[in-house]
Amino acid sequence: MVLTTEFLDTGGVRYWELTDDGATASADRQYRPRLYVRADDRHSLSDLREYLGEHPVVAGVEEREFRPGWREDYEPMLRVAVDRLHHLTEIAEQVAQYGRPGGYQCYNVDFSREFRYCLETGRDAVPARELDVLRVAAPRAQVAGVDPLREVSVGELTFEGVPEVVAADVSARIRDRDPDVLQVSSADLIPRLFATAPVDEDVYALGRRPGYTKRAGASTYESYGQVEHSPARYSIPGRVIVDESNSFFLEEAGLSGILDLVERSGKPLQEAAWASIGNILTAIQIQYAADRDVLVPWRSWRTERFKTASQLDAADRGGFTFEPDVGVHKTVHELDFSSLYPNIIREHNISPETIRCDCHPDREDVPGLGYSICPDDGYLPEVLSPIIDDRADIKDELATTDDPDRVEELEARSAALKWILVSCFGYQGFSNAKFGRIEAHEAINAYAREILLDAKAAFEEAGYRVVHGIIDSIWVQPREDVEQEPVEAVAREVSEATGIELEHEGVYDWVAFCPTADGRDGALTKYFGRQQSGEYKYRGLECRQRSTPPWIADLQRELIEVYDETRETDAVLARVLDAIGGLRAGRVEPGELAIRNRVTKTPAEYGHETRNVAALRRAEDSVGGIAPGEDVEYVVVDDEKASRDRVELRSEDPQDYDTEFYVELVARAAAGVLGPFGYTQEDVISGVESTQQLELTTPR
Amino acid sequence: MRPPRRQSRHDRGRVSPADLPELDAEVTLLEAEDTDVRPPLHALSINEVLLSGASGESTATWVDTGRHAQTTSLHDLAPAPRVLDRIHVARGFTAFQHHALIREAVDRIDATTVAVVAPAVDAIYRESDLSRERARQFLLRTVAHLARVARRYNIPVIVSRARDDDLGSIVAEAASDTLTYRETRCGPRFEGSDHETLVYDVGDGWVQTTLAYWRQVLETRRPLYASADDDVPTPGEVA
């Protein structure tokens, strides 16, 4: 079992294994990372073998048989061992240039190091006992270096005072507690503690030996058109670092969710904690491939097949959508296909190597596209099946268990698996995905459309009208003039016909569909309503957006309740007026008006002097700045200003706010609720103004 | 380049066909001045397929770059949807895939292939994680393949480029002719090395270069596509 590893300067690896009451280190000096090379029919392996055999950083070259892809046979390849990890890419680049483009292709090049070590040595990364986790945290300005490091909490203790003493105390406390995992408030706390310590960096210890390693610098990158921030990463000997401020899975699924992923992906805990969803999904597939001697291409040379422009046109259509009529609808049933995309993959054997296979060119399986799907089992359904089944089992157990600890653990594991399943569809269409294929993506989409259209037809047949639908959910309403089959019965029929369960999510007493921004059509993802269970549902409204100030979000939810009780838009407007009155009278706590935004760039990179920029400049002064990928929270105090005085940070405890700016936000939130009744934001404002005129001129 | 086929413009009560340049069996770079090159590129390509024969007789092979030269407007331009069955498309999402597709396109050429289209050839090489020098070498091999196609199979190859820089100039140098597309007061105009084509003056002084305009252009040329009758329904037919 491997808890964590260190790649040694002298070559080889030191790895840590858990014992009953701690961990021990062993050195594996013989370990050399490996890559593989395949030659096409224009090139020869022996030429390359000769070249690599004399290369100073190559530790060994062997000719062995491996499979370059899922449906491909074993063929001779070169297995190249290199002295150090960083030589892998160096050699791969040289090999790629050795022949004509595509002549020599490299495999198993870009894996994360700890995952690689486990994969290549067959060592397991699943902890054999429960892990001891210790939380280490410090205030942000102290971590950033704006203020001296005077206050660090370690578990339940807090050390305060002279920075050098605090750093020494933190180290001593960690040594005494000897945890397996350090959960840090921010990874930057690691180098900060080392820099503050009264002793040298190679003597000071937070790990089970002194010292630390910087694994990656902070960087900003773009993914799926969104700016993402990758923070710096550090590791320490013998303990796993989990960075609270930057672990997607810690936030979504907790440590038990991550541990589930360790088992499935073979990624050691530290790498699983900082991994993205796609990264975990890839690791799961790499492991599955490695078990079958299938190698992982470094650069994707596999192309999509030529198709006709009409096929492309059909394939480019998005998922199923059925635009709702704007307004309030009574008695509406919502039905969702559970895990639609993963289930389509499983049900229809969709996999990169089964779509448009060579062996069955005449089959026309995929609806609307006419692609063939090989009847032999594909690997993707096999990889996803246990995840789909385990998640279903977890949901079943959740339905019956009352133990709060167990519920928490199951929910965490379910959340981790949900994200893997959600991403497997998009991943197929992602150009850099190691195992993705655009045709698989298109086929999944085509089946999804077909399934939703079939479900729509079934409900219409059974006496319902479809009022709304999107991707994997469909909303139906009983028609007044005919008798209906029960919703559950229709859902059962559809489930049986499609092989995918259609779940009855709930019944709305009433649901209001909002218009699009231009007011012309029904928006697909903006609605609110009350279910028969009494629960309110909101989608796409301001109150669901994380940037909306809490006071505005509360107000919007209240407006919906007012509507629910009175069914009168005038009553809603009256409450809006009341709220604006409170705002103008200064009765709102400024902190409740804080806007929270994710930072995507540094202040210099923003083109305009926005409120965000003003807030970031203030943050530079007070807490040492806020890095891309993190949140900034501020209250608008004078929106007329362009300087940093336009806003105040929530952490500065603002005492005032810009009334008219927030009146505008109220009007926007109100228009969100009144949109289904034909009100725009301007209507709300003029409605409010005319009422105020009336109040001013009408004697009481 | 051959002069464009001239049609009588004086038939009353009947719209005369718009002019489009005819392409020679060589690599032609289509450049657009201050406007999107895609609509004219797509119109020229469809025109080439329809001019050359009926369904089953003429096809085009199209190597796309995924994000840069999306083929969606083909659908809006096609005078009959079935012409889309005769354009064979594959997209390279990385430089490696794009290069491999160009090589594959060469293998796919058969008696029905009347044109090869490769929009924004340089784009994906510029964005790849390759060093600039390697990207240049790589792109050079790609355009060499395209030039060989025109030569060996004696068919037109239509290319465009995303930028006019060191990579873009590799594409320009490989082209035997450059056709510059310009929107003038009298309507859109193609200028080649030895002649000019005014496409179609809608006569109201307004330069219309929307997809609807190009659709109309192809529509007026229907008589020229006589041999492709089975593809082009007469007005009033819906299916």
Image (spheres, coloured by chain):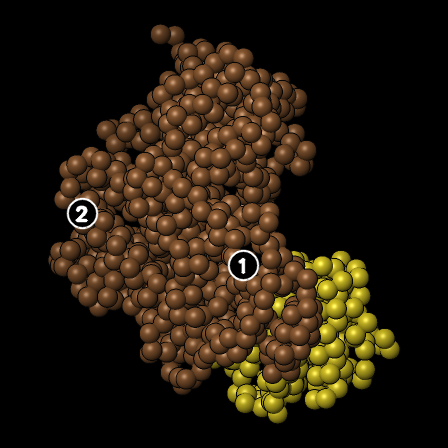
In the displayed structure image, the side of residue A56 where residue A578 appears, left or right: left
| Residue displayed at 37% across by 53% down | A124
- List the residue tagged with mark 1: A33
In the displayed structure image, the side of residue A227 where residue A453 appears, left or right: left
Reply above or below: A511 against A498: above
In the image, the chain rendered in yellow is B
| Residue A448 horizontal/vertical position (percent) | 35, 63
Q: Secondary structure at mark 1?
A: loop
User: Observer-nearest residue: A290 or A328?
Assistant: A290
In the displayed structure image, the side of residue A137 where residue A613 appears, left or right: right
Q: Which amino acid, mark 2? A: Glu
Image disc number at residue A397: 2
Tell me which numbered mark, 2 or 1, is placed earlier along the sequence.
1
User: Residue under mark 2: which chain is it in?
Assistant: A
Q: Which amino acid, mark 1? A: Pro
| Residue displayed at 46% across by 78% down | A74
User: Where on the picture, by quarter, is residue A97?
Assistant: bottom right
| Residue A369 horizontal/vertical position (percent) | 42, 74
| Residue A429 horizontal/vertical position (percent) | 48, 62
Q: Which quadrant is the C terminus of chain A positioned in?
A: top left
Reply above or below: A111 against A46: above
Q: Secondary structure at mark 2?
A: helix
User: Observer-nearest residue: A202 or A494?
Assistant: A202
Reply above or below: A110 against A350: above
User: Residue under mark 1: which chain is it in?
Assistant: A
In the image, the chain rendered in brown is A
Q: Nearer the viewer, mark 2 or mark 1?
A: 1
